[in-house]
Amino acid sequence: MASCALTSSLNHRFRPLSAGRPRLHTPKSVPFVKSVVKNSSNDSSKPLNNPQRRDHIQPITKKPSFLLPLPKRESIITASTSAASAPAPPHQPWQGAAIQPLLASIATGVILWLIPAPSGVSRNAWQLLSIFLATIVGIITQPLPLGAVALMGLGACVLTKTLTFAAAFSAFGDPIPWLIALAFFFARGFIKTGLGNRIAYQFVSLFGSSSLGLGYSLVFSEALLAPAIPSVSARAGGIFLPLVKSLCVACGSNAGDGTENKLGSWLMLTCFQTSVISSSMFLTAMAANPLAANLTLNTINQTIGWMDWAKAAIVPGLVSLIVVPLLLYVIYPPQVKSSPDAPKLAREKLEKMGPMSKNEIIMAGTLLLTVGLWIFGGVLNVDAVTAAILGLSVLLITGVVTWKECLAEAVAWDTLTWFAALIAMAGYLNKYGLISWFSQTVVKFVGGLGLSWQLSFGILVLLYFYSHYFFASGAAHIGAMFTAFLSVASALGTPPYLGAIVLSFLSNLMGGITHYGIGSAPVFYGAGYVPLAKWWGYGFLISIVNLIIWLGVGGVWWKFIGLW
């Protein structure tokens, strides 16, 4: 009877469910919780056929993990353990604006906005000035990329009704920002095809047997590329820094191991200081140069064309390119005076590159066509932007540069944005009469000193030049001070076109005084070959030399070609 009762009891407990009742879940669809897995794991030492446990079996609606086949049971236990011990997701860093620089920019604008406008200045002009200076502070401190800062400045102009939308964004129809954007696309093709490296290696293979000759070969190859690559940071970082570093290593000069002075210190400083000279020699050699040309047109209604710029800069520029490397060679000499391995390394690189590729030939031909149109555009009635569009069209049609690559050239679009914003705001400051008021105020002060226009202009030049210690961008400096200083110089008797040319050249040369003043500065300084104190010290010394050359030799040359 007992056995029958037990059998009946077991049959009752484990009989199949009727069709009307829900089915048991299959092992593939059973959800499990940690407690079940844990309990089944702890009881695994007690077999299921243990008579002591049979009387305690309870009805179940879901199969626990110990009824699963062994592989699935192990995987569930492993997954539970992994889930329990998985680390928390890493904290995402702040992706927005740098708060302190942003607050500094906003505070500048708010404080100036709340100050009553001086006598003779309209309220609209004063409000625009406050937004403009806040934008300049933002461009210097960079809480966001330059384009974003400039766009926010334009937005503030429209929001406060200081400018209409059409006025705020009017400069996006100006050809100058587009010229620079197009030139960046050219630079992409120049670097992509390897034509830039080929030119540099060719110079080194011919003139690089001594340290001084090596320096000059790099200096003049960079100057040759300057008209075609408007970004001095692109020339420095994309082409010449890798080349210079490889040459230094080949000569046994490495950063951080005490061998910097063998060659690297002098070569890095030389390449940097001459990069600001080559940037000053051509309208398209630095991204902010067209901004100076545009402000000149707005201020004195005279145009600085590509050929005009190059003709005025060629003599003082070449003198500086010759004198500066030699001067640094004397006062900051390299320990290695000869570099026989450099031409060999350059020839090896050229041999490895092989003959010019089809894309290099197309790039070279397009470059010659475009630069030729820039030079002779006045005669052919083809402006600079049209020439650049024609050249880019050739590169796009031949596939040397793709439109996708142009869209990915973020620096070009960023430059287009902040250029246009600064041009618009600076232009309306002039239209609102603020620049004329500032000029008259300074004229009264400097004019009261009773100096000739030459001495007065000299004082303005020094103020303009060395105030760059407070700027991390040539564009920001030009946007903030160029128009005002040109207006003051003209009012004091300086020939307007001469004043514009000089201030335009100095807007590049002043970048050499710090390790952050121009795009090539952080590139070469970051290589680690020159201590900061020497970088600033030699930067100040070379700035004096450049001022003497450009105002002395340049002044004689400009007199000869009839600029004054």
Image (tube, rainbow, N blue to C red):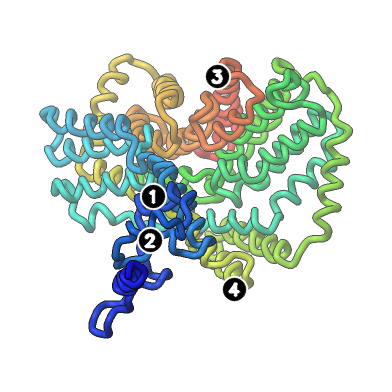
Estimate the spatial distance between the alpha carbons at disc 4 and disc 3, rounded to whole Å: 46 Å
Foreground disc of the pair 3, 2: 2
Q: Are marks 1 and 3 in contact (CB under 8 Å)?
A: no
Q: Using the image, tell me which numbered label, if any, was put on residue 39.
A: 1
Query: Is residue 369 among the parts visible in the rendering?
Result: yes
**Spatial distance from mark 4 to mark 2, Cα to Cα?**
68 Å
Query: In the image, what residue type sits under mark 4?
Result: Ile
Q: Earlier in the sequence, mark 4 or mark 1?
A: 1
The residue at 72%/49% (across/down) is 197
Q: Residues within 10 Å of mark 1 (few under 14, many from 20)?
A: few
Give the Cα separation between the discs numbered 2 and 1. Answer: 10 Å
Within 10 angstroms of label 3, few (less than 14), some, or many (20 or more) residues? some
Q: Dot 2 lies on which element?
A: loop
Residue at 48% over, 43% down: 289
Of residues 30 and 57, the one drawn nearer to the viewer in this rendering: 57
User: Mark 3 = which residue?
Assistant: 536
Q: Secondary structure at mark 3?
A: helix
Residue picked out by circle 4: 397
For the point 29% across and 56% down, the residue is: 170
Q: Using residue 313 as the reference point, say whether residue 144 is left or right of it.
A: left
- At 35% from the left and 33% from the top, the residue drawn is 481
For the N terminus, give its image quadrant.
bottom left
* Residue 192 or residue 257, whichever sits in front: 257
Q: Dot 4: within a 10 Å radius of its alpha carbon, few (fewer than 14), some, or many (20 or more) residues?
A: few
Residue 21 in the image: x percent, y percent?
A: 24, 79
Count numbered badges in the picture: 4
Q: Quadrant of residue 461?
A: top left
Relative height, residue 231 to residue 215 (above, below): below
Front position in the image: 138 or 460: 138
Report how far apart the C-alphas of labels 1 and 3 lie in the structure.
72 Å
**Residue under numbered circle 2:** 64
